[in-house]
């Protein structure tokens, strides 16, 4: 009986420890997804963790310098930006660059987007369109072969290792077998994008034109791309270039100040 009781006690203790770990990760995930501090009540409400337990966990995280207390609110320490894996890094990019996306929309009147490369695809993380509404696009939606979008082109062009792997896979032939695009032509286009620091793209259906620029954190490769999209008839290349290049610098400053080297999503898998 004593042995069985001991086993039950051990199992109960292990379950309790796992629950603490799960709750801790959940609080860090929520804090990483927001660019502003959250109160104890907000964290408790968002996580579903009782307020007393939330308070104890936050005190422990503050003591470990993983979370900062700011007045009556809390925020993740900049040194752990990106904590929690790929989903956390996507949330960090959204939190830090969504204002840049909104500014681009307000300045130009075009739809503005924030994108990253995941695998061989360009993935839109958020979009702002008139009248200034922000859409947080789920990562599993709004994907396209990287070379078919301005954002994907600019990310490929500024990451030589990824672009070479992309071309070696023949992925662009598989996605557009009748387009006649050659690897030589694609590499030439990447060279031009690197020189100009901006990529342009057109789509016949619907008839739209887009432009994109890279945003760097502390990494040698871009962390994300900012882009503008509009009807081809109303799209002004000069306006788009000026707005995007200026915001590329601003976005890079934000990421470097807040841990941009930890928001790297761009590597081909497989």
Image (tube, grey):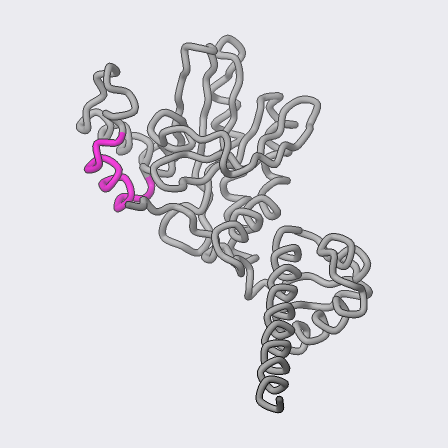
Q: Nearer the viewer, residue 81 or 169?
A: 169
Splitting the image into 4 quarters, where does residue 53 fall?
bottom right
Residue 95 x, y percent position in the rendering: 61, 47
On the picture, is 174 further left or further right than 154? left
The question of residue 181 being in magenta is answered with: no
On the picture, is 146 further left or further right than 235? left
Highlighted range, magenta = 158-171
The question of residue 169 being in magenta is answered with: yes
Give the prevailing secondary structure in the magenta stretch: helix
Locate the C terminus by quadrant.
top left
Furthest residue toward bottom: 2
Who's the residue at 62% across and 61% down the image?
28
Who's the residue at 31% across and 46% down the image?
269
Furthest residue toward front: 1
Residue 242 x, y percent position in the rendering: 51, 29
Residue 120 x, y percent position in the rendering: 34, 37
């Amino acid at each position: 009986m004593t042995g069985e009781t001991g086993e039950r006690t051990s199992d109960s203790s292990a379950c309790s420890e796992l629950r603490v770990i799960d709750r801790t990760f959940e609080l860090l995930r929520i804090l990483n997804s927001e660019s502003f501090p959250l109160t104890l009540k907000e964290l408790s409400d968002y996580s579903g963790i009782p307020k007393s337990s939330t308070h104890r966990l936050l005190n422990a995280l503050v003591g470990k310098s993983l979370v900062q207390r700011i007045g009556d609110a809390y925020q993740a320490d900049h040194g752990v930006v990106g904590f929690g894996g790929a989903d956390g890094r996507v949330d960090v990019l959204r939190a830090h660059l969504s204002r840049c996306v909104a500014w681009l929309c307000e300045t130009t009147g075009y739809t503005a987007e924030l994108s990253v490369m995941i695998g061989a695809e360009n993935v839109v993380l958020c979009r702002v369109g008139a009248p200034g509404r922000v859409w947080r696009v789920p990562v599993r939606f709004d994907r396209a072969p990287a070379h078919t979008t301005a954002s994907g082109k600019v990310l490929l062009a500024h990451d030589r290792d990824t672009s070479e792997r992309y071309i070696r896979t023949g992925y662009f032939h598989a996605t557009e077998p009748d387009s006649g695009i050659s690897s030589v032509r694609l590499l030439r286009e990447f060279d031009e994008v690197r020189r100009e620091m901006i990529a342009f793209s057109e789509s016949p259906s619907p008839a739209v034109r887009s432009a994109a620029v890279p945003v760097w954190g502390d990494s040698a490769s871009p962390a994300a791309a900012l882009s503008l999209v509009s009807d081809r008839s109303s799209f002004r290349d000069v306006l788009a270039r000026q707005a995007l290049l200026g915001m590329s610098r601003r976005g890079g400053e934000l990421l470097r100040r807040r841990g941009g080297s930890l928001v790297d999503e761009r590597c081909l898998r497989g």
